[in-house]
Amino acid sequence: MDSERSNRTEGPLARGASAVYAGAMSLLGVVFEPLQRLLGVRRMPWVFLLPNLLIFGLFILFPVFLNVYVSLTGGTELVPLDRPYVGAENYERLFTCDDFGDP
């Protein structure tokens, strides 16, 4: 029975899916093969990692560093450059506070 299945020809759906897959792989090859020749095999992972690292930096690292900078400044201005630098004074006040409900 297995030999009967293996001897059958592919149906039109399977042939169509194979053609779409082959076309997609050919299209990717047109883009990535010259890039791989230019950069080399060892640097190709960076081609795939760079967009993810840029998005991570934009939405994770930038806000974290901005919050650290704002925590080291005083005042009520929204623009960070208009806020006076106070250093660790905010952290000192936070760690020496007796009543966090009434700082």
Image: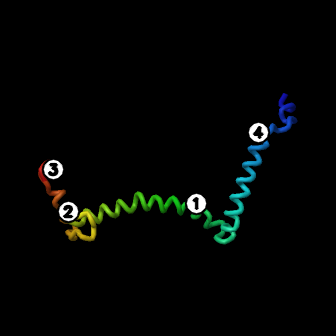
Q: To which residue does mark 3 refer?
A: 100
Tag on residue 11?
A: none
Q: Amino acid at mark 1?
A: Phe
Identify which residue is drawn at 83% across, 32% down: 5
How far separated are the C-alphas under marks 1 and 3?
46 Å
- Gap in Å between the C-alphas at discs 4 and 1? 32 Å
Which residue, given by chain and number where applicable, does mark 4 sit on?
13
Q: Residue at x 23, y 66 (%)?
A: 73
* Mark 4: amino acid: Leu
Mark 3 to mark 2: distance in Å? 20 Å
User: Disc 4 on helix, strand or loop?
Assistant: helix
Q: Amino acid at mark 3?
A: Phe
Please state the horizontal and vertical placement of residue 103, each as a whole percent of the image. 13, 53
For numbered disc 1, what is the local secondary structure?
helix
Residue holding disc 2: 76
Q: Are marks 2 and 4 in contact (CB under 8 Å)?
A: no
**Residue 13 or residue 100, whichever sits in front:** 13
For the residues labelled 2 and 4, the Cα–Cα distance comes to: 65 Å
